């Protein structure tokens, strides 16, 4: 793997097969605007297998995952971003990504929905998207929230509407996830553009006019043989330079302890009702599909820790 003339990484065909997922941080050489370019095919394929999604569903989740990684990459003080995409009763998607590109996501579809049926048939149904973002700092409980809504057949458009409504800096994403006509495998490529302060009007116009005229990203991947240096040169209207690079990875923070903490937060009354049912509690993680079991003995102990007296309707004061 070598640095090309623009300072970005150049991969041989062999390198590319080993280096499936990458996130490049770059700017134009005069540092007037920034961009982040992402390839996420390996991770999207993993998500499809994990959640048993159809190809169109996996393409939708792939766009959501790229949006999460790209938005997290432009965070300044925040540590992570949590994105929620709701489309009425049709489908829900959740993405959580750290600034270091550790991400996870899920897509839940109502298979009886007419819009989901259209999606699975390869059509582009218009979903009533509501996009909600939560940004959090590692050393604080404060959350920075943004919410927007739009009806569109494009998740990219829904994300860009959200950026216009919720972000101060002029920012735009381009997202593309597609099925290879050669072997049927999924590919995912995305880019985010961010104006830096005091950008001259003529440079801004040149940048956004260039972006508006770009074809789907799959055309650049095919034309450049997956060469990131060549792709960046096509995506940016000026000479570019590399700042940093990361390898996005799938990471789920669920655990037995975190599940038990969630159950305890339900309170004594709810926990007592679960104990009275005389059945172990089963909790499935949305992100990784792992199921955790909390048996009756542990639930009784948790109830006691909350100040309850098992076997009676009374409670004792917390120590």
Image (spheres, rainbow, N blue to C red):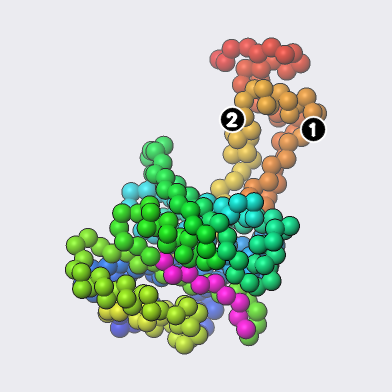
Q: Residue 84 at what x, y percent from top left?
A: 52, 51
> Residue 268, relative to residue 184: is it above or below?
above
Residue 150 visible: yes
Check the image and report above or below for 28 versus 250.
below
Screen quadrant of the C terminus: top right
Secondary structure beneath dot 2 equals loop
Check the image and report above or below for 103 versus 123.
above
Relative to 69, residue 294 above or below = above
Q: How many marks?
A: 2
| Image quarter of the N terminus | bottom left
Q: Is residue 129 magenta?
A: no
Q: Nearer the viewer, residue 120 or 151?
A: 151
Residue that lies at the very extreme toward the right in this rendered image = 278
In the image: residue 35, left or right of residue 198: right
Q: In this figure, which residue is indicated by the disc labeled 2?
A: 265
Distance Cα–Cα, label 1 vs label 2: 19 Å
Which residue is tagged 1?
A: 279
Residue 270 position within the rendered picture, expressed as x and y whole percent measured from the top left: 68, 26
User: Do the numbered discs 1 and 2 sit on residues whose CB atoms are within 8 Å?
Assistant: no
x, y percentage for residue 282?
Answer: 73, 40
Question: What residue is shown at x 74% (from left), y 13% (from top)?
Answer: 312
Magenta region, main secondary structure: strand
The residue lying at 51 percent from left, 52 percent from top is 130
Q: Which numbered circle lies on residue 167?
A: none
Left-right relation of 85 to 135: right
Q: Quadrant of residue 250?
A: bottom right
Q: For the point 69% across and 15% down, which residue is it?
A: 309
Magenta-highlighted residues:
173-181
Q: Is residue 301 visible?
A: no
């Amino acid at each position: 793997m070598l640095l090309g003339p623009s300072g970005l990484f150049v991969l041989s065909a062999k390198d590319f097969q080993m280096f499936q997922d990458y996130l490049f941080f770059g700017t134009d050489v005069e540092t007037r605007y920034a961009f982040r370019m992402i390839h996420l095919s390996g991770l999207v394929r993993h998500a499809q297998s994990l959640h048993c999604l159809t190809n169109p569903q996996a393409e939708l989740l792939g766009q959501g995952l790229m949006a999460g990684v790209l938005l997290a990459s432009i965070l300044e003080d925040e540590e992570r971003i949590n994105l929620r995409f709701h489309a009425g009763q049709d489908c829900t998607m959740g993405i959580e990504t750290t600034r270091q590109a550790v991400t996870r996501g899920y897509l839940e579809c109502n298979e009886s929905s007419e819009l989901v049926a259209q999606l699975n048939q390869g059509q582009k149904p218009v979903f009533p998207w509501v996009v909600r973002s939560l940004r959090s700092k590692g050393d604080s409980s404060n959350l920075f929230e943004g919410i927007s809504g739009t009806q569109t057949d494009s998740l990219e458009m829904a994300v860009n509407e959200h950026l216009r409504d919720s972000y101060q800096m002029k920012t735009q994403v381009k997202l593309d996830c597609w099925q290879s006509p050669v072997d049927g495998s999924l590919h995912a490529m995305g880019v985010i553009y961010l104006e830096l302060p005091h950008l001259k009007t003529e440079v801004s116009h040149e940048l956004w006019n260039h972006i508006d005229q770009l074809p789907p990203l799959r055309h650049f991947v095919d034309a450049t043989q997956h060469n990131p240096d060549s792709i960046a040169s096509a995506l940016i209207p000026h000479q570019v330079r590399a700042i940093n690079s990361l390898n996005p990875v799938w990471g789920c923070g669920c655990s037995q302890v975190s599940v038990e903490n969630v159950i305890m937060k339900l309170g004594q009354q709810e926990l007592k009702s679960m104990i009275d049912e005389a059945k172990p509690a089963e909790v499935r993680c949305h992100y990784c599909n792992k199921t955790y079991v909390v048996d009756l003995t542990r639930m009784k102990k948790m109830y006691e820790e909350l100040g309850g007296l098992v076997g009676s309707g009374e409670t004792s004061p917390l120590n």
